[in-house]
Amino acid sequence: MFVDEIIVKLIAGNGGDGCTSFHHEKAMPNLGPDGGNGGRGSNIIFEVDKGLKTLVDLRYHKIIKGDKGTNGKGSDRTGANAEDIIIKVPQGTTITDMKTNQVICDLINDKEQFIVAKGGRGGKGNAAFATHDNPAPRMSENGEPGEIKEVKCELKVLADIGLVGLPSVGKSTILSVISASKPKIAAYHFTTLNPNLGVVKLKDGRSFVMADLPGLIEGASEGLGLGLKFLRHASRTKVIAHVVDMGAQEGRNPIDDFKIIQGEIEKYGHGLDRKSLVVIANKMDLPDAKDNLDEFIKEYPDLKIIPISAFSLEGVEELVIKLADILGSIKEEEITPSVDEVVYKFEDKLPFTIEKTSDGWILKGDKITKLFKMTKFNEDESVMRFAKKLKAMGVEEELERLGASRGDDVIIEDFVFQFKD
């Protein structure tokens, strides 16, 4: 089964909790804080495995959850880090954050890794809070929450040359006859509705990967048919080989056919319209093919056009050599486009929002939530630290500006506090 797109929820592991502990020896109590830090939670890492060809293994793992780090202990014992979760994916897998629609990583090289969801750091033990002013703190932290992300995994076929064109122009036939000609090919077929890959080897030792990308029709760039899926696969290729039926069977016009597909490629964008283009003029064994080719060349005099007949094998060997030559002329930086999208955002002045409701003042924000979850509310010093950090963030000042009165309820997550001095 060929699966080229899947959505997965990732829940990285929480950090282990820090420990509140004091060193004791016989007849010498309270020698100082010795609570250790917690260990880091599981990262969720995606790794390329060139042996994989589809994302089917992820189909039955819609939620992937990491483990919590080990809690810290007394005697300055730091908790162990949780083992990372490694997800194997094929070459050419792009991971996109569903919330921001930003590309997180583009995994191409074998064994390449990327941490997609980071495990939370371990909470600090009380030994880490010791200062000159407070040498024996009676507080520690809970572990930091691990990242939670919903991501889309997309497989874009890695091929040097992508065959595009309207249905029935001979793309699959060209791939099959190359296997029957002197250059050898090892084909990895999925289904007729999915990309077909072939490794082409020339007699001079050169080789390249060709992909037959079916399914393109007029309107493909707008999602009609299977167009978007195969335009995505084509975006990974180095050269676009546009197959045109010069025999003009069934009343078709080669020039119009070419315009339809090129129009879809231009509408799709994503750098596809800037790739090297070659036209494979197929079905030259048919009666009207030569006249149609002459008209086509008049319309597009600057295009690289290679006439062949996949049926009679005329021009097939020359086609393979010319394609290898074109690939050899492309510079590396032209064929390794970066799809990473980095968006720099200036944070709002306040890293939280406050909403007044009938139940009280609801306080929200990623930093607020993280601080809340890492605070041990059964320790007085931890509660005082929590309040000081909220004040430092500007929460108290903002509540006053919005009209909150002392004694009003302030709600964070499911916990209710009172607004006090």
Image (cartoon, grey):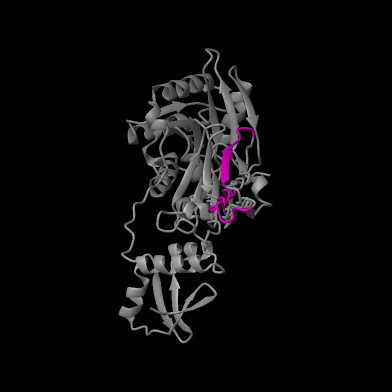
Which of the pair 116/110 is nearer the observer?
A: 116
- Does residue 407 sit above or below 98 in this rendering? below
| Front-lying residue, 30 or 303 | 30
Magenta residues, dominant SS class: loop
Task: Please state the horizontal and vertical placement of residue 109, each as a whole percent of the image.
Answer: 52, 32
Q: Nearer the viewer, residue 16 or 111?
A: 16
Quick check: is 39 in the magenta stretch?
A: yes
Report the number of discs: 0
Q: Would residue 356 appear left or right of 225 to someone viewing this image? A: left
Quarter of the image containing the C terminus? Answer: bottom left
Q: Position of residue 252 (x, y in %)?
A: 48, 43
Q: Is residue 79 magenta?
A: no
Image point (50%, 65%), residue name:
382
Q: Residue furthest top?
A: 204
Q: Could you tell me if residue 361 is visible in this image? A: yes
Q: Is residue 344 above or below residue 113?
A: below
Determine the residue located farthest toward the bottom in the rendered image: 358
Q: Quadrant of the N terminus?
A: top right
First to last magenta residue range: 27-51
* Residue 54 at x, y percent in the picture: 63, 41
Judging depth in this view, the residue of 362 and 122 nearest the camera is 122
* Residue 247 in sight here: no
Left or right of residue 66, residue 236 in this image: left
Look at the picture and state if 366 lies above or below 418: above
Task: From this view, report whether residue 86 is shown above or below residue 239.
Answer: below
View extreme (front): residue: 27
- Percent position (x, y) of residue 199? 58, 26
